[in-house]
Image (cartoon, grey):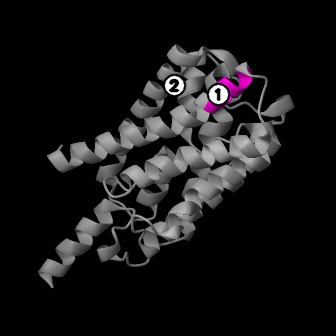
Amino acid sequence: MTSSGIGRWLAECAGTGLLVGIGTGTIVAAGRGGGIPPWLMALAWFAAVLVPILLFVGVSGAHLNPAVTLALAVSGRVAWREAIPYWTAQFAGAFAASFAVERSLGTGSHLGATLPAHGLVAPAFVAEAGFTAVLVASVFVLADSGVGRWRWRLLLPPAAVGLSTFVIGPWTGSSLNPARTLAPAVLSGTYSDLWLYLVAVPLAAIVVAVGWKPRAVDIEDQGVSPAVERESEAGELTD
C-alpha cells in the first residue's frame, strides 16, 4: 500500500470510528439516562455522519460504510482494488469505536446493536433496504456532482441517516451500515436476526448501484471517489 493509500485507510478507519462512536455512544448514554426523544437521537446520528464527512471527505471520500463502498465499486465509481482496504479500515474503525464505548460507558443497550422490534423481521428487512437505497442515492449525487468541502450536498448522507433514525430507528435500530451493526453485535454478543442487516443493506446497495450508472465527476471539485479522480486524470494525460 502506498503512502497515499495508507492515508485513505487511516481516514476511513478514523471516520468510521467517529461515526460508530458518536452514534452508538449516544444510544448507550441515553439508555443509562432513561432515554431521549427520537428527534434528538436522529440529530445525534446526523452529526455522527456529518462530522467525519467534513473531516475526511477530501482524503478518502468518507465512505464510512462498507455498503457505500460496495455500491461505489459495483457502479464503477471507484476501482475494486480500493474496496478491500476500505472495508478493512471501516470494520477496524467500527470495532475500535465499539470497544471504546464499552470501556467508557459500559455494555448497556447492547452497545447500540441493531435489533428488529417485536421480532418484525420482514418489515425491518424492507425498511432497512429502503433507507439504504436512499443513503446510497445521496452518496451517488455527491459522486456524480462533485462535493467540495463546504457544499450543501455534503448534508445529504447525514440527512438520510438522520431521517432513517427518526422514522425506522424505534423498530429496526436503523443500521444502513454493516460495520455499524456488526461491531456492537459481536462485542455485546447480540446476534439475534443479525443476518437481516447483513443481507438487506448490501443487497439494496447493489440494486441501486446496478441501476444508477455514473456520470463524469467534476475533477476540480474533489469528488467522493479518489479512484475515479485518479483514473480520469490519467485519461487526460493520454489524450
Q: Is residue 234 above or below residue 70?
A: below
Q: Residue furthest right?
A: 118
Asked if 13 appears above or below 63 in the picture, the reply is above
In magenta stretch: residue 114: no
Please give the name of the residue rendered at 45% of the width and 35% of the height, measured from the top-left corner: 17
**1 and 2 marks in contact (CB < 8 Å):** yes
C-alpha distance separating marks 1 and 2: 9 Å
Kind of element beneath mark 2:
helix
The structure residue drawn at horizontal position 52% and vertical position 32%, both measured from the top left corner, is 21
Which of the 4 image quadrants contains residue 109?
top right
On the question of residue 179 being in view, the answer is: no
User: Which quadrant would residue 236 be assigned to in this image?
Assistant: bottom left
Query: x%, y% of residue 197?
Result: 64, 38
Against 172, residue 201 (above or below) is: below
Q: Quadrant of the N terminus?
A: top left
Q: Is residue 96 above or below residue 76?
A: above
Residue at the spot of label 1? 112
Given residues 142 and 228, the one toward you in this image is 142
Q: Which residues are magenta?
A: 26-31
Main SS type for the magenta part?
A: helix
Q: Which quadrant, please, contains the C terminus?
A: bottom left
- The spot of residue 84 in percent (x, y) is 34, 43
Query: Which amino acid lies under the numbered mark 1 shown in the image of this protein?
Result: Gly
Q: Which residue is mark 2?
A: 98
Q: Position of residue 15 (x, y in %)?
A: 42, 42
Badge 1 element: helix
Within 10 Å of disc 2 (Cα), the crowding (few <14, some 14-19, many 20+) is many
Residue 212 visible at all: yes
Say which mark, if any, is on residue 74.
none
Direction from residue 94 to residue 30 in the image, left or right: right
* Amino acid type assigned to the residue bearing label 2 in the image: Ser
